[in-house]
Image: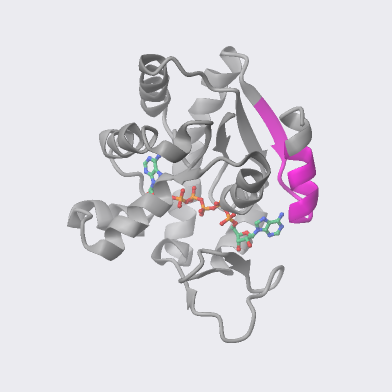
Amino acid sequence: MLIVLVGPPGSGKGTQAKLLIDRYGIPQISTGDMLRAAKKNGTLDKDILALMDRGGLVPDQVVIDLIDRRIDEADCKNGFLLDGFPRTVPQAEALGALLEKRSRKLDAVIQLDVARGLLEERLIHRRTDKRTGQIYHLVYSPPPPGADLEHRADDQPAAVGKRLDVYEEMTAALLPYYQAKGLLRRVDGVGKPEEVTSRLLAALGT
Ligand code: AP5
């Protein structure tokens, strides 16, 4: 199964990806996680780091190169779920070329729909467990006592607004691109996480 999850920041891509990969036995490939890992290792260029923390997109070629290397790893043999990539039409075109070179094809592009007012609230209250990567929300899915939590730099209110604007300006153009290819399926991302998962599985026909 080769799946792309598209949706605005906070729409639940990471939360749902973790549930879907267990179901399909495929890895989650999140360019955001890969960039944050590079930040921790000190291997991310300082200008790119500043761009990310302010809520902007990193240059297309940086993430295309990450994906080009990652999809050749052994765990991707039976498929993978892309979370947060592609985010622009040039990235989508590059992905098409990378897959064609490997004689592989996308099965579906799932768009998670959530209204902007809810997204801000979800992001500002998000916390992630530093050790396990588990995603929490201080109100809807509170972390257990003693969890070692991280508050992402780009979840500060100013960066959240910028990320939502960037999504509307740049990433939303992906939707007609994949619609024209007959791959796009829209899923309502509002409701309990397990209700959203059921809708996703139905959209994927499983
Ligand atoms: P990335 O890490 O991909 O962030 P994002 O797309 O902004 O998405 P988020 O991780 O913020 O949200 P999500 O949709 O995964 O929601 P989550 O499940 O966590 O990218 C970060 C940055 O990296 C970008 O800004 C850019 O700089 C750079 N980057 C990455 N990829 C790039 C690319 N391809 N090109 C260029 N730059 C790139 O949920 C959010 C919160 O809501 C959590 O608290 C969760 O508990 C809660 N929640 C989830 N589901 C529900 C629900 N059903 N009900 C109530 N609460 C819920």
Is residue 33 on the magenta stretch? no
Give the residue furthest to the bottom. Answer: 146
Q: Can you give x and y, in whole percent of width and height, for residue 100 in the image?
A: 40, 15
- Where is residue 189, by image quadrant? top right
Q: Can you give x and y, in whole percent of width and height, for residue 34 in the image?
A: 37, 51
Q: How is the image coloured?
A: one colour
Q: Is residue 147 left or right of residue 192?
A: left
Residue placed most toward the observer, 66 or 187:
66
Is residue 191 on the magenta stretch? yes
| Residue located at (79% from left, 33% from top) | 202
Q: Is residue 166 left or right of residue 22?
A: left
Which corner quadrant holds the N terminus? top right
Q: Is residue 174 left or right of residue 96?
A: right
Q: Can you give x and y, in whole percent of width and height, for residue 114 in the image?
A: 67, 46
Residue placed most toward the observer, 147 or 187:
147
Q: Can you give x and y, in whole percent of width and height, for residue 160 in the image?
A: 48, 58
Q: Give the magenta-colored segment's residue range.
A: 185-200
| Residue located at (39% from left, 66% from top) | 153
